[in-house]
Image: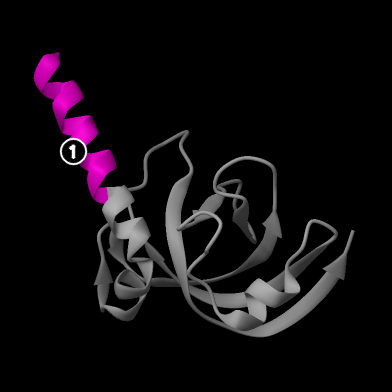
Amino acid sequence: MRGHNLSALLGLGLVLALATNASFACQSAQAMGGKCFALRGRVYLSNGTPSMRISPIGSRHILGVLPAENEDAPESIKRAVTFDQSVMADMEVCPLNLAKAGEMQMVCIRSASNIALKNH
């Protein structure tokens, strides 16, 4: 049990270290949680950390964009998304941790196109 907790702490530390340098993760060919992938989804702000989140079309999963409060995302997304406005976009995201059932996967947004604003 003790070794399991240590592994979890080390994994969290690695994700936090990547989050502070998420630009590096999004620039590299492969992020810590696996290969970058394309999706279309809604980017929105929510209470909690991280506040910027992605809801991929056709999925119930929610992706969190790191680092919190200074998200690694294209400026076009960061400027457009507010608590009153979300965007739909085609994106390439890079996972910063391994996907686990029932947990939000952390990503950075490498690129975005076909951006459409949606007022709430």
Query: Which of the 4 image quadrants contains residue 2?
Result: top left
**Between 60 and 14, which is closer to the camera in this rendering?**
14
Residue 40 at x, y percent in the picture: 61, 71
The image shows residue 104 at horizontal and vertical percentages of 48, 43
Tell whether 23 sits left or right of 83.
Answer: left
Question: Does the magenta stretch mainly form a helix, a strand or a loop?
Answer: helix
The three-letter code of the residue at mark 1 reads Leu
Question: Residue 76 magenta-drawn?
Answer: no
Q: Residues within 10 Å of mark 1 (few under 14, many from 20)?
A: few
Q: Which residues are magenta?
A: 1-14
Q: Residue at 84% of width from left, 69% of height from top?
A: 118
| Image-quadrant location for residue 21 | bottom left
**Residue at coordinates 41% horizontally, 71% vertically from top-left?**
37
Left or right: 47, with 22 as reference point: right
> Is residue 60 visible in the rendered structure shown here?
yes
Q: 92 above or below 34?
A: below
What residue is at 23 percent from the left and 32 percent from the top?
Answer: 9
Q: Which residue is mark 1?
A: 10
Q: Is 5 one of the magenta-colored residues? A: yes
In the image, farthest residue toward the right: 120
